[in-house]
Amino acid sequence: MAKGTTIILLKLEGVLQSWGDHSKWDYRDSADFPSKSGVAGLLACAMGMERGDPAMAELASSLRIAVRADRPGVRMVDFHTVKGEPRLMTANGTPRGEDKSTIVSRRWYLQDASFLVAVDAGALWTPRICQGLRDPKWPVFLGRKSCVPSRPVLERVTEEYTSVLDAIFRYPAVSENGERRSPAGLRYECEEEWGDSSLYTRADQLLSGERDFALRTVYSGIVPEEETPCT
């Protein structure tokens, strides 16, 4: 059988995950799927790349990803307060106003979710990413540093599939009792259009090693029955 594209399969599972799309100031949201910037950050962390490294933007632009929600999880919100005496300080070390002695924020999470992420990183990045995932320079996390994976994130590296979309369509899902089952009815998100997928945009295309993002077009749909031919 002819070899396909080298695909890195990740399993993102944990008690909590959080993948912000529009987080700003005191409101911290979470999307239903891992963000591309979050996946790029996870890989960069495993490889030991510092924040601000311009190579992070090169990494993000090289990635093609597709995500399947094997277990979408349950959404929860943490009502979070931070108090300082006499006043809280800003990030640059200056005191906040008198009315800012307490900050109230709401932070959203996904509980007990499980995602299969197929990554095509190209010939340049794939060996470095695999090495980093097998022997991480720093601990990786699922969107936020408080969200620790409950298992190794590297599932496998394979050439069995022709694309990331093909991988999430055909890679077996696991049911609650641990048995393999057809991934029928599971939602997915990908940059490739297929069938009756719906189109929308996400602000998660990393532009630099800092917090600079661009809009990215993605498609969402339902994974077909296992026996359905894949494009």
Image (cartoon, rainbow, N blue to C red):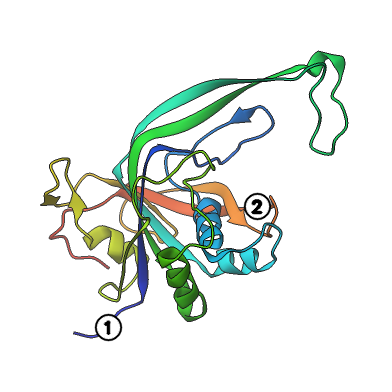
Q: Secondary structure at mark 1?
A: loop
Who is closer to the viewer here, 74 or 42?
42
User: How far apart in space, not on screen, are marks 1 and 2 (Cα)?
Assistant: 34 Å
Who is closer to the viewer here, 223 or 106?
106
Type of the residue with mark 2:
Phe
Numbered circle sitting on residue 213:
2
Check disc 1 and report the residue beneath it.
Answer: 3
**Rendered view: 44 above or below 177:** below
**Across the whole image, how many numbered discs are drawn on residues?**
2
Q: Residue at x 79, y 37 (%)?
A: 91
- Apparent side of residue 37 relative to residue 100 in the rendered image (left or right): left
Q: In which image quadrant can residue 135 be found?
A: bottom left
- Apparent side of residue 68 relative to residue 217 in the rendered image (left or right): left
How packed mark 1 is, by other alpha carbons closer than 10 Å (few <14, some 14-19, many 20 or more), is few
Residue, far top: 99
Q: Residue at x 48, y 67 (%)?
A: 132
Type of the residue with mark 1:
Lys
Q: Secondary structure at mark 2?
A: strand
Quadrant position of the N terminus in the picture: bottom left
The percent position of residue 148, horizontal first and vertical second, equals: 44, 43
Q: Residue at x 41, y 61 (%)?
A: 192
The percent position of residue 26, horizontal first and vertical second, equals: 66, 27
The percent position of residue 172, horizontal first and vertical second, equals: 19, 57
Who is closer to the viewer here, 224 or 119?
119
**Could you tell which of marks 1 and 2 lies nearer the N-terminus?**
1
The percent position of residue 55, horizontal first and vertical second, equals: 65, 69
Quadrant position of the C terminus in the picture: bottom left
**Rendered view: 51 above or below 114:** below
